[in-house]
Amino acid sequence: MEKYRDIAAVLPVREGSSRVKDKVILPFTRNLNLLEWKIDQLKEVLPHENIFVSTDSDKLKQIALDRGVSIHHRDPFLCKGHLAKFSDVITGVAEGIPLKHLAWITVVVPLMSPNDYRNGFDAYLNNVVEEKNNDSLVAVNLLKEYFWHNGKALNYTADENHTISQDLPDYYKVTNGLYMRPTEDIIKGKYFLGSNPHMFTVAKMAGIDIDEWEDYEFSLAMQKFYKESIIE
């Protein structure tokens, strides 16, 4: 954990949700809701004091206290749906974080494992901090799939010259599971990514983002495979 001493893991959460009610406290295992689950995952990787639950909710703050991690007291205006600009939400969080590097972590991406976070943090330290090949990091899924837009094929020729999926160009889908950038740069740029992020590729399972109820059901169904991947 010592090599991660300058990294803050921030979990921005709020009560309520427009599509899935109170989704950050939905039960995920027999004993843990999604927020508790994510905190416990990160406690395997980072010092407890480096994990910040960012919220205006007393209920969610109490969960953080009960699990021994830090609280970032967020302005209530920045937690009310989409009233505030997202850039203001990001800077409003980053300005209260005392560590040099910030990992913005989404609670409702439950199947990104502690080992995924270790690998992501290592990739960030290597590519952004040490080698300076990139200015930030984002977790992604590599997609080798066929895309259309406005009636046209985007990434292949839909005719007798059809491209096999292995030869499709690399397209990346942001999983919403992990964003990393120096805290000072986030504040200056008002965003958690720079112009040249490192694409940190994770498994499809680690990219499940609970945005609709079926995503929640899918994540529950995938727990068996998650546990098997941890054992391996």
Image (cartoon, rainbow, N blue to C red):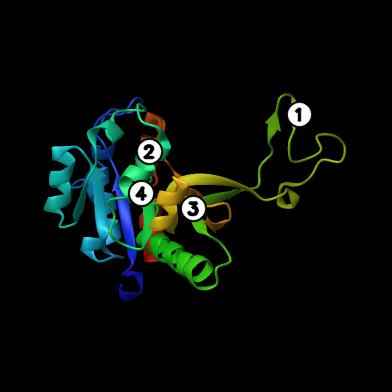
CA gap, disc 4 to disc 1? 37 Å
Quarter of image, res 228: bottom left
Three-letter residue code for mark 2: Asp
Question: Residue at (37%, 30%) from the top-left corner?
Answer: 213
Question: Which of disc 3 and disc 1 is earlier in sequence?
Answer: 3
Query: Observer-nearest residue: 192 or 170?
Result: 192
Residue pointed to by mark 2: 88
Q: Where is residue 195 in the image (x, y as percent from the top left)?
A: 57, 51
Mark sitting earlier along the chain (2/3): 2
Say whether disc 4 or disc 1 marks the residue closer to the N-terminus. Answer: 1
**Disc 3 secondary structure class:** strand
Question: From this viewpoint, which residue is outermost toward the bottom?
Answer: 2
- Where is residue 41? Give x, y as percent: 29, 57
Which amino acid, mark 4? Gln
Q: Give the CA separation, mark 4 to mark 3.
A: 20 Å
Amino acid residing under circle 3: Ala
Kind of residue at disc 1:
Lys
Nearer the camera: disc 4 or disc 1: 1
Disc 4 is placed on an element classified as helix
Residue indicated by mark 1: 152
In contact (CB < 8 Å): disc 1 and disc 2: no
Q: Which of marks 4 and 3 is in front?
A: 3
The quarter in which the N terminus is drawn is: bottom left
Going from the N terminus, do you reach mark 1 or mark 2 first?
Answer: 2
Instruction: Give the x, y percent position of residue 69.
Output: 19, 56
Q: Distance between the residues labelled 2 and 4?
A: 35 Å
Which residue in the rendered view is the most extreme toward the front?
188
Q: Which label belongs to residue 139? A: 3
Towards the viewer: 177 or 85? 85
Disc on res. 223 = 4
